[in-house]
Structures are given as C-alpha cells and as structure tokens.
Amino acid sequence: MVRPVRLIHAALLASLFLIPASASAMLSGDYFVREVIDGDTIVLDNGEKVRYVGLDTPEADEPLYIDAKARNAVLVQGRHVSVLVCGAEPRDKYGRVLAWVTSGGIPVNETLVKEGLARIMTIPPCGLVRARQFKALEDEARAKKLGIWGMIASQRLAVDIFPIEAHRYVGQKVRLRGTVRSAVPWGRTWHLEFRSSNGFRAVILPKAVDEYEMRGLDILDYRGKEVEITGVVTMRDGFPEIVVYSPSSIRENP
C-alpha cells in the first residue's frame, strides 16, 4: 500500500516537470537578438520573447508599422543587447518578458518613442516606472512632428474635441478627449460609454479586442479614466460614435 504522504510527494515532483519553461523567471543580463517580430517585440537566442515596456508601436495594418519594425531591427537585430527585466511584473499574461533593452549604449525603448515611432503606454506597474521620462520624449516627438505625430499633423485632425461636440464632426477624422463612464461587452464587440448628453460611444471591434488580449490589456481599465481617441465620427441609431480598430487608437491621458 502506498502511503498518502508518498503520493503527495510524487505529485509535487511530477508537477515540477509540468511547469512550462516560460513560467520560470528570466534574469536581467546580456543576450543575443535572434529575431525582430515588430516594433516593440523581439526574440532572444534562448527562445524568450521580449516585449518592450512603456510603449506601443503601430500594428501590421497601421501606418508606420514597417518603419517601426525596421528601426527596431537596425537597433537590435543580430546584436548583443542588455535586457533589464521589470521586477514588479517580469512577464505579461502571454509569457513574454517585460523589459527595457539597451543596444550599443542606446536605450531602445526610449529611442522609439523619441523618434515618433511609438506611443507611450503607461500600464502599471512596469509602464509607470519611466512614465515621466517617456512622456517628455513623446512630447518632444509631437512638437517636432516626427513619425506618427507628423502623419497626424498632415491629416489635419480636429484637435481636442469633446464627446458633446461629436455630432458636429460626422465623417471627419478627429482626436476626441473624454471620460469613460462604462465599458460594456456586446458579444465580441465592446462599447465605451462616455459622460455626454448626446450618447457618444466608442465601439471596439472584435479584431481590436483580440489585440487587447494579446497585449495583456483589459478594456475594463478604461472605466472612470480620461482617454483620447483618434478616429472617424459616424452616426448609428441616432448616436455619434467612433469605431476602434486597434488599441493604438485609444490613449489614456496621464
């Protein structure tokens, strides 16, 4: 007869071998970059995927995606880099290592923001560590109209409109600032309802919802926060709305 204690010990030992490699911690240090996935994600020679902290570069279906990926490749592809893992949250929900990367003395995260190839992303806890520095770099890129910000300026966006004004800008691409009252799922689509008497809402499409999940972001976190949304105002059922195709279209105001 096998004693219960022995069964417990055997189960614990077996569980150690069932833990995936991605669940273990990766130490900060120097690593070789095997592959560049996009503007903010790379693969190291040990197989680990590293997601840059504090920023978000354009997705594959967005302008400047190739530019951001190419610039990232110039900085790190085939090079030895220094990886500083975020101690507060070493990995995201997809097992990617969250880190700041330096290549040849150049801080890669900061460089992409400074050159206008990324927006800042202040998701706690890691995104808050250098938030003030990243915000200053983004403001500098905006002022110089670099990269993303140059495209926005050239498109002549209506700057700083509020939800109550949205019905006056139907058919126009705007940058709208307002406070999210609630986030409501409608099947695979989400509605962000705003504090506005005209019923303005932002509609996050399923494709964008998938991207939120891939990036480890929670749409519910928008509740009660002031955000900035870039998109085209349309009317549906008598209410103005902006359709969101990517998380990059929504930015939390610090």
Image (cartoon, rainbow, N blue to C red):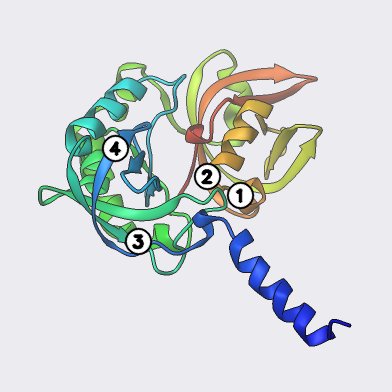
Which circle's residue, 1 or 4, is located before the other in the chain?
Answer: 4
Q: Contact (CB < 8 A) between labels 1 and 3?
A: no
The amino acid type found where label 3 is placed reads Val
| Residue 127 at x, y percent in the picture | 41, 57
In this view, the mark in front (4 or 3): 4
Q: Are marks 4 and 3 in contact (CB under 8 Å)?
A: no
Quadrant into which the N terminus falls: bottom right
Report x, y in % for residue 98. Answer: 41, 54
The residue sitting at the top extreme is 171
Residue labelled with disc 3: 85
Image quarter of the C terminus: bottom left
Disc ID at residue 227: 2
Type of amino acid under label 2: Val
Sequence order check: which comes first, mark 2 or mark 3?
Answer: 3
Whichever of labels 1 and 2 marks the residue nearer the N terminus, that label is 1
Of residues 98 and 17, the one drawn nearer to the viewer in this rendering: 17
Give the alpha-carbon distance from disc 1 to disc 3, as whole Å.
Answer: 26 Å
Estimate the spatial distance between the alpha carbons at disc 1 and disc 4, rounded to whole Å: 36 Å
Q: Residues within 10 Å of mark 3 (few under 14, many from 20)?
A: many
Q: Where is 243 relative to 116, above or below?
A: above
Q: Is residue 252 shown left or right of residue 85?
A: right
Residue shown at 63%/26% (left/top)? 207
Q: Which mark is residue 34?
A: 4
SS for tag 4?
strand
Q: Tell me which residue sits at (40%, 69%) in the image.
A: 87
Look at mark 1 in the image and give the residue it sits on.
222
User: Does the residue at mark 2 contact the one at mark 3 (Cβ under 8 Å)?
Assistant: no
Q: Residue at x 56, y 56 (%)?
A: 20
